[in-house]
Amino acid sequence: MFIIYDLIILVFTLIYLPVYLLRRKFHPGFPMRLGILPSGLELNRPIWIHAVSVGEVMTVKNLVRELRIAWPDKRFFISTVTPTGNKIAKGIVRETDFVSYFPLDLSFIVRGVVDKVKPSLLIIMETEIWPNLISCLHLKNIPIVLVNGRLSDRSFRGYLGIKFLLKPILNKINLFCVQTRADAERLLRLGVSKDRIQITGNMKFDASARPDIRRGSLSINGERSRTIDIKVDFKKTSHAQAGRDYTDYKLKLGLESNEKLFIAASTHPGEEKIILGVYKNLFKEFPDLRLLIAPRHPERAGQVEKLITQYNFKPIKISQLNLTPNTYNLKPIFILDTVGELVYFYNIASIVFVGGSLIKKGGHNILEPASLGKPVIFGPYMFNFRDIAGLFLENKACILAHNREELFLNIKDLLINPAKSTELSQRAKTIILQNQGATARNLECISNYISAERRA
């Protein structure tokens, strides 16, 4: 089976590589995907954490911090797939750690990487199933823990079709720490043993709030370790959670005291046209409303820039601004073409639309703007975040806009009725507080495997 799998991956790679080059997505770190790592790499049996992209890296950040506290001598090998995720990962490691790109799941490549890295444990964020890597680690008795696990409708349907092939691979994973009971039930239907599944909650609730953390001790299998007791002061984090003064970002955009900012975050092709059409109509009634578009993929900034000019607005990329007051002859529409700054702009927003939801992309994470007290709007296609979106809708803590007209009417309503914005944000904060603690529960599960390694 694995020979056939290798052939499929190899053929796919050879076919896709020219496309990859034509789209200019080849980056300096690509050789790492072929298993080429520094010759002198010595990490002393690190914890390997795989987080695909920005969202997964940001979610795992708190877990890395707590693992450092519990096991201060442990080093980390963090792998990502996307360049943006890789860049963010480099910001959470130390000099003694290493950030890499995830190797292609070809048996001869992953064997070489595993032999060079010599991990003591692999932590997989969410649901990344790589048969060759999982099998290689299993043969070497290296434990594998999947955290923040979830199975979307689409993934589950696809996995059911190959259950007979997937079941033996899944049962080589030592533990699945999943977000919900529904995720646990889906794993059971795929043939995962019940004793390998724990429902620990969604770490995104911890990551989004960026809480102040009070630390205590925890006894795990007779060894003294650490855990966390999460306590959030939203009044404090709303201004200083990112460690910067939010007023700097008002200055950066040249916003006056009477001006409000509407952010369209994580947008995809097709959504910007809808947003711009809505904003053009809003601007007629609310000339003090400003718009910032943050495309999901910053490299699309040029496309968004051209689109904005078609609507007779002046596009300005954030990378072209300085932290000094600005004045403009024409009121601009801002384009966020940098990585890692969106949270700072959330701080000064009045309303946030979360993209990937007006078109069939499945939506994106609404927790970060919600945790900052911002009223959040999204479209009807939130299937990748169904549980979170459903929880917020059930508690009237967000707004669902099915189409362009509803988006316009809901934004207008929020601008006219600021009390409604306050009610939405207060309900959202309550939901976030009630659902925190997954990081601590996952830490306890993971620590069992680290403790076992130390005793071996």
Image (tube, rainbow, N blue to C red):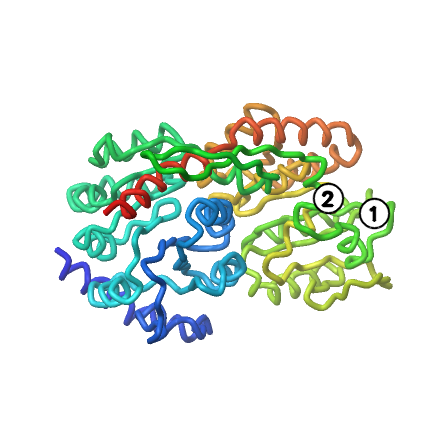
Q: Locate residue 168, reporting x and y percent.
A: 16, 44
78 and 307: which one is in front? 78
Residue 117 against residue 164 in the figure, above or below: below
At label 2, counting other C-alpha atoms closer than 10 Å, the crowd grade (few under 14, some 14-19, many 20 or more) is some
Q: Seen in the image, is 235 located left or right of residue 68?
A: right
Picture residue at 45% right of the left edge, 39% below the top: 226
Residue that numbered label 1 is attached to = 259
Task: Count how many numbered circles sit on residues in the image.
Answer: 2
Residue with the most extreme top position? 395
Badge 1 amino acid? Glu
At label 1, counting other C-alpha atoms closer than 10 Å, the crowd grade (few under 14, some 14-19, many 20 or more) is some
Give the structural element (helix, strand or loop) at label 2. helix
Q: Locate residue 48, reporting x and y percent.
A: 35, 55
CA separation, marks 2 and 1?
Answer: 18 Å
Badge 2 amino acid? His
Please identify the quadrant where the N terminus is shown. Answer: bottom left
Residue 425 against residue 162 in the figure, above or below: above
Which quadrant holds residue 254? bottom right
Q: Seen in the image, is 391 located left or right of residue 179?
A: right
